[in-house]
Every structure is written in C-alpha cells, then in structure tokens.
Amino acid sequence: MLITNGKIITWDQPNQILEGQAIQVIDDRVAEIGPQDRMIADNPDLEKLDAAGQYVMPGNICAHTHFYGAYARGMAIPGPAPKDFPEILEKLWWPLDKSLNMGDVRASAEVMLVDAIKHGTTTLIDHHASPNAIDGSLDEIADAVDEAGLRSVLCYEVTDRDGKEKARAGIQENVRFMKRLNSGGAAANRIAGTFGLHASLTLSDETLEACRAANPDGEGFHIHVAEHEADEYDSVEKSGMRVVDRLSKYEILGPKTIVAHVVHIDIKEAELLANSDTWVTHQPRSNMNNGVGVAPIEHLLRAGIKVGIGTDGFSHTMWDEWKTAYLLHKVWNRDPRRFSGMDAVQLGVYNNAALANKFFPQAALGRLEPGAFADIIFVDYHPHTPLTVGNLPWQILFGFNESMVTSTIVAGKVLMRDRNLLTFDEEAVTSNARQRAPEVWARYNTFVPN
Ligand SMILES: [Zn+2]
C-alpha cells in the first residue's frame, strides 16, 4: 500500500513535516518514506490510499484506560452524591464492575474500541476489573481488540476487596493470559499483557507477595498509586510505609511497571520511582472529575521520571487529554508559563511511545520512519496560520480535534476509511451495549450500598 498526497508529521526527534512524499506500507510496517513521484513510478501496481492533502501522522497512544467502564455513562448513582474518591469507588466503580458478566465485558470493550478507532487512538494500555467474570475475561477483551484491529496491553486488576478467592482468581487470570500470549498467535505483535493490581489500599501484604511471586522477574505491573490521600493513609496504617515505599518493598516497581495518577506522593516516593525507572501516567480529566487534586507532573519530569498520559476510561480522545493537562497545570499554579505545549508532546507523543514500545519491542511506535509499525491516522485539519514543526504542539492544542480524524490504520490494516469503520459496525456495537445496559444497571442497583 502506498499512502499518497499527505502532509506527513513524523514525530521523529526532531520532528519533521514532509510534503510531496509518500509512505509505502508492507505488512504491518512502514517500508519507505520518499519522494511521491518516484515511489509511484517505482510501484505502479501498488494499491494507493489517497490522503487528499490531509495530515498523516502516527496514531495516538493511551497509557492508561479501563475498557470495562462503558456502562457508567448515563447511569444514576442512588442517594447522596459521593463526597470524595473513596465514595466514588464504593458507590460507582465497585458495584458496577461486580455487575458485569462476560458478555458485558465484551460489549463494553467493543464500545471503547470503536471510540478509539474513530478518534485515532491506535494503542491502548487497559486495566480490567470484573469480579464476577474473572476467568477468561482477558481472552474476551483480547478477542475484541483483535477483531477491532487495534493494539493493546491488557491486565486484570488483582484486589482483596472481594475476598481471598477472587484475589487468587485475579492473579491466575494475569498469569494464564500472559502464558497464552507467550505461546504466540496471529495477533502477537498487537496484543500484550502485563500484571494488574488495583491499588495499595485494597491489597494485603500477603496478596502483594503472591503477585510478586506469580509474575516472572523483569515483567512489570500496572497499578493505581496515591490517586487520593486515602491510599497513602491506608498504607501508613497497614504497613508504616507510604504507598510507593510499600510497593518498592514488594518489588512491584521497575522499568516495565506503570503507576497511574501519583497525585499525593511525596518527594521520597518520587525518588523511588525515578531510581527504579518506573513509569507514571497522568489522567487529568479523571483527576478533575474525581476532585482528587493535581499530580506534580513538571516536578516528576524534572526528577527524571518518565510520565505518560492516559484517559482513565474517558473517551479515547488523546488531544482532549493533552488540552486538559495544558490548561489544568496553568490554573492550578496560577501561572500561564506552566506545562507548555512541549510538555504535552513529551508526555503524549514521546513518552507514551517509549512506554508502548516496552510491550511491543518488535518495531518503533508513535513515529513514522522506515521499519516502524504502520499505525497511522489522517487528520482533516485546515490551519488558518502557517503550521510549522515549531508551532505544531500549539496548533494541536488549539486547533486539532479528534473528530477531524478521518482514517485510522493499525499494523498496516485500514480500520477506518473516510470515517467509515471497516472492522466494527458502530450501530451494532452500540445497540448491543444499549440492550444490555438496563440489566447491568439493575444488577448494579443490587450491589450499590445506600
Ligand atoms: Zn484508572
């Protein structure tokens, strides 16, 4: 396949915007980027994908999300509104994830994957929970990801909140799924696994130890950390240690471990994250929605910590997440110089790509160059001022919108062309979820505490 007539944003370092060039895709990789006239002359029989003057760029990457959360949209929480994040967990997420059966898990994932394709998010790092449908849930999600054609890292969140047996089942699900992936398969370059943990506040020492023992050395974990002060106080009470110190003790940290949020960590904890090369992800829309505070992202970057950015189950509109971070840190610090467009690109492009590449080391992600994975989107953006490499971050922050994504390609396969979804029927996916929602909500109402 030859992608022609695009303005190619490579997200190389330094970034380039190429005109008059074409991209040749062979199998799941970019084979060549070169002068369009010559490439067409050299490959007269190749199928052409005409970008018609649109921007052609790497697909976006989401560093932390929850495919299981789709049924939360429009759902009523009975009684007084939750007053803080622990109550949001108890009154919304925990009774909701208990309500999911295997079919709901699949349907929720499909809704989220359609959303990702439409909005140009091509790699997603998911964190799954369905305490009444644990065994095989990662297979179910992997099948949906495979059908969608997207790229994804999956895990099951181990927790003690539903008792020892379900904690053990969660551990088993992670172990079983990663073993299955190691045995290969067609989607081996598109689907990866990691070991999920909910958060320190729902994990006993015994379970942390069991997780460490079950996960081979060098493999990482994916866990929420200090999203709310409650996580820190719980940890201090349980262990005499703050959360990151406690995770360090159980050897949960490391270069393949992702800790989401870190809103309430202290300087010593930041040092432990930096020294262990652990990844942090920032989800500003979620943090604002839950009223939990603002993670000190600029300080973490200065401390040498690698920070990526995710949606935490919000719509997979990554530029919206960049925009939120860009605005949030300015108002929080009452200083418009804070969190620049370059910071947004550092998290959203370079760090997210490096993180995703930890799980898909076979080829480069998040940039267009020969040999890279062909994960590509077309963006129908018409700048009314000159768009340059220098001002691209701000053109994106103030001008780009995910509804401008018209085509989405992952691993060389076209998943959406001119806004037509080719792997999923959106109406079928949404109507299936809509039909299931009343039963999910009815079950939720039996679990929710009043
Ligand atoms: Zn999360």
Image (cartoon, rainbow, N blue to C red):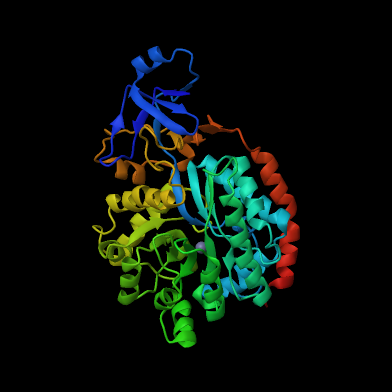
Q: From the viewer's perspective, is 279 left or right of 428? A: left
Q: Residue at x 74, y 54 (%)?
A: 436
Q: Residue at x 57, y 39 (%)?
A: 149
Q: From the viewer's perspective, is 302 left or right of 174? A: left
Location of residue 337 in the rendering, given as x and y in whole percent from the top left corner: 23, 57
Q: Note whether residue 257 is visible.
A: yes
| The one of 364 and 115 positioned closer to us in this rendering | 364
Vertical position of residue 310 compared to residue 42: above or below: below
Which image quadrant is residue 443 in? Answer: bottom right
Vertical position of residue 116 compared to residue 445: above or below: above
Which image quadrant is residue 43 in? Answer: top left
Q: Note whether residue 81 is visible.
A: no
Q: Residue at x 48, y 23 (%)?
A: 1
Location of residue 88 in the rendering, given as x and y in whole percent from the top left corner: 56, 71
| The one of 274 and 261 positioned closer to us in this rendering | 274
Vertical position of residue 224 compared to residue 239: above or below: above
Classify the position of the C terminus by image quarter.
bottom right
Vertical position of residue 370 compared to residue 115: above or below: above
Q: Residue at x 66, y 57 (%)?
A: 137
Location of residue 310 in the rendering, given as x and y in whole percent from the top left corner: 45, 55
Q: From the viewer's perspective, is 41 left or right of 89? A: left
Location of residue 179 in the rendering, given as x and y in whole percent from the top left corner: 59, 55
